[in-house]
Amino acid sequence: MRRLLPVLVALLAFSGTATAARPVRSAIFFYPWYSNPAHDGRYRGWDKAGPGLPTDVATAFFPLRGVYSSGDPRILAAQMRDLRRAGVDEVVSSWWGQGSIEDERLSAVRAAASRRGLVTAVQLEPYPGRTIESVAADLQYLRSLGIRDVYVYGVGDFPGDAWRSLNLRLSGLRVFAQTGMVGFAAYAGFAGFYTYDILVYGGADFRRLCAEAHARALLCIPSVGPGYDAATAKDDVRVKPRRKGATYDSMWRAALAAKADLVSITSYNEWLEGTQIEPADPIAGYDSYNGAYGLRGSASEWAYIRETARWTAVLRRR
């Protein structure tokens, strides 16, 4: 672990200068990886769609804004308007390491979010070649950008002792572990945990997990979502039906009953897994939000943005 010492010293230097951010009660996972030829020269992120693009997309639903580019400032501005309307506090942007397209677009995401009064965090993904040493460098880098919250996906890739060596509580960041193993998160030194996966963690475990977290002085951040359908993109036969909004509502109720410190939402625009709440276009050949919360037609396109606004308002009153 001697190679980590210079990085750890730099991380510790930030701890004395970190300023308190405004309270964050809700966060949403955001994906800036989409590209199209008009803006970027090629398609990216709309996987396995074959030659039929831009209408033949590998998703169960079709985005109202079409097969867009996350690098388009007009798209980013519209998406942040959605999230402001939805009442969320924090945009957790997927991040695949320094130099990745998600890293290149992070500043634009932060600027667009800031204009709408939203905080930006990152989800540190399991990028190729990720090591505990590279994570240490990533945390230093992200902190230098002004990022305060880092959600680490796939913490089980490294043992607890490796995470513990980073002294995460002294990094000037709040670092959250994506896991249901609360004891692991506590031992490793994370500030809290989040579940992300709405298939594995459907809400029934939230109360137990939050109780375990609070007993260990950890923040409990269960993840709620409207449904899951990745069959077209990933040949994944698992499906969590939306039930016209009932799935989303039941997960929100479970998170609030568990006395969650922060509620995370999976997701704003993970279209390939069908967890998105971003407005969808009810065109032929794709599922739609028709019927969600009794809404139909153009009103249904915004059903999950509207419902998220209702739940975040409930959360803020608690």
Image: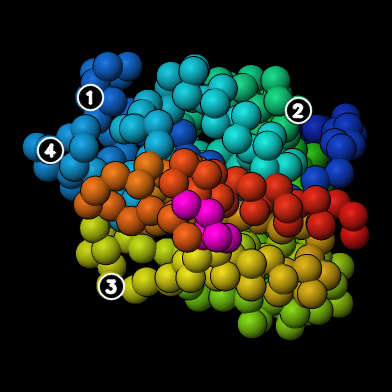
Q: Are marks 4 and 2 in contact (CB under 8 Å)?
A: no
In terms of depth relative to the viewer, which is nearer, 11 or 117? 117
User: Magenta segment range?
Assistant: 292-296
Above or below 53: residue 212: below
In primary-sequence order, the first of circles 3 and 1 is 1
Q: Earlier in the sequence, mark 4 or mark 2?
A: 4
Label 1, residues with CA under 10 Å away: few <14, some 14-19, many ≥20: few
Residue found at x 83% / y 70%: 259
Distance CA(mark 4)–CA(mark 2): 38 Å
Tell us which disc is closer to us: 3 or 4.
4
Residue 303 in view of the camera: yes
Give how far apart the Cα atoms at labels 3 and 1 are: 29 Å
Q: Mark 4 = which residue?
A: 52
Q: Label 1 vs label 4: CA separation? A: 14 Å
Q: Which mark is residue 42?
A: 1
Q: For the residues carrying marks 1 and 4, which lies nearer the camera in this image?
A: 4
Pick whichever of labels 2 and 3 is earlier in the sequence. Answer: 2
Q: CA distance from mark 2 to mark 3?
A: 39 Å
Prevailing secondary structure of the magenta residues = helix
The three-letter code of the residue at mark 3 reads Val
Q: Dot 1 lies on which element?
A: loop
> In whole angstroms, how far apart are the C-alphas of marks 2 and 1?
32 Å
Q: Mark 2 sits on what residue?
A: 117
Mark 3 lies on residue: 237
Q: Is residue 216 visible?
A: no
Q: Is residue 223 left or right of residue 58?
A: right
Left of 235 or right of it: where is 207?
right
Q: What percent of the width, then of the height, locates residue 60?
A: 31, 55
| Amino acid bearing label 4 | Gly
